[in-house]
């Protein structure tokens, strides 16, 4: 059996996924209701595939995916979503999501999606793929920090919270000097000169 972790804060969705996978070669080994629980459960159960609801209380599916990739975890992640906004879509595509499935009608296609991603393929519904392509051609629609990668966006968020380089390094497990290098690169990418401007951009993005 191929172990799958299901993360969704709605119990009936988790139960529904288990029902859909019953009798297939996929088996739900853990079910969680938040990003924080999910990260802990991944360490405990080591699933082959993670099925994430995009909107959960606390750490949502986008943030959970970014943390996983930031840790170097490359296991397939499939997002299960009722809706996804432009910023979320760009973020998950940038972070390397393997699949995106609409909750509406997921019972018909979920097993096929899991088969694809387990085989090393992408399984992103055409409507999401086309939307991501359209957004990539309109940089203005991607938010103030669109040019930054997930790690850089994380640093920008910590700067916006007022953390010093030393504290940012401690939060991310990197040296203070490495944080300075990251910031210098980020300033160049964004065409800004200092951390105050960076903090303002990060706050503006959070407000959008």
Image (cartoon, grey):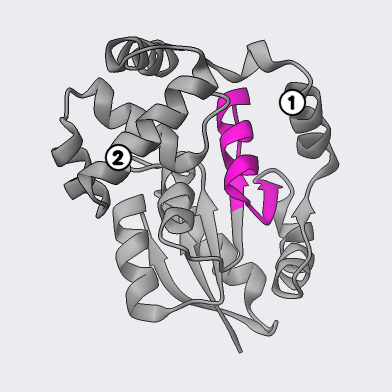
Residue at the image point whose x is 76% and y is 36% from the top: 128
Read off the residue under disc 1: 136
Residue 112 visible in the current orientation = yes
**Callout 2 secondary element:** helix
Alpha carbon separation for disc pair 2 and 1: 28 Å
Seen at 43% across and 54% down, the residue is 70
> Is residue 163 a member of the stretch shown in magenta?
no
Residue placed most toward the observer, 116 or 179: 179
Relative to 206, residue 112 above or below:
below
* Part of the protein shown in magenta: 79-102
Q: Which mark is residue 167?
A: none
Q: Position of residue 96 (x, y in %)?
A: 63, 51
Q: Would residue 34 be visible to someone looking at this image?
A: no
Q: Nearer the viewer, residue 26 or 141?
A: 141
Check disc 2 and report the residue beneath it. Answer: 179
Image position, residue 73 (x, y; %): 48, 66
Residue 124, compared with residue 3, is above or below; it is above
Q: Residue at x 83, y 32 (%)?
A: 130
Residue 43 point in image, percent of width and height: 34, 74
**Nearest to the observer: residue 94 or residue 58:** 94
Which residue shows up at 72% across the image and 67% down it? 117
Residue at the far bottom in the pictured view: 1
**Left or right: 75, with 71 as reference point:** right
**Mark 2 or mark 1, earlier in chain:** 1
Give the quadrant of residue 76. bottom right
Q: Residue 91: say if magenta.
A: yes
Q: Quadrant of residue 39?
A: bottom left
Q: Categorize mark 1 by other alpha carbons within 10 Å: few (<14), some (14-19), many (20+).
A: some
């Amino acid at each position: 059996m191929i172990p799958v972790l299901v993360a969704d804060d709605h119990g009936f969705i988790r139960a529904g996924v288990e029902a859909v996978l019953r009798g297939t070669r996929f088996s739900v080994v853990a079910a969680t209701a938040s990003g924080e629980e999910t990260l802990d459960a991944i360490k405990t159960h080591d699933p082959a595939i993670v099925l994430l609801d995009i909107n959960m209380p606390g750490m949502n599916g986008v943030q959970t995916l970014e943390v996983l990739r930031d840790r170097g975890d490359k296991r397939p992640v499939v997002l299960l979503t009722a809706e996804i906004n432009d910023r979320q879509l760009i973020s998950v595509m940038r972070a390397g999501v393997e699949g995106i499935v609409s909750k509406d009608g997921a019972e018909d296609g979920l097993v096929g999606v899991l088969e694809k991603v387990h085989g090393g393929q992408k399984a992103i519904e055409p409507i999401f793929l086309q939307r991501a392509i359209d957004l990539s051609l309109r940089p203005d629609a991607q938010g103030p920090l669109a040019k930054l990668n997930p790690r850089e966006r994380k640093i920008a968020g910590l700067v916006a919270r007022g953390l010093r380089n030393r504290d940012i390094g401690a939060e991310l497990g990197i040296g203070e000097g490495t944080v300075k290098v990251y910031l210098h690169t980020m300033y160049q990418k964004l065409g800004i000169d200092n951390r105050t401007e960076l903090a303002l951009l990060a706050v503006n993005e959070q407000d959008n």
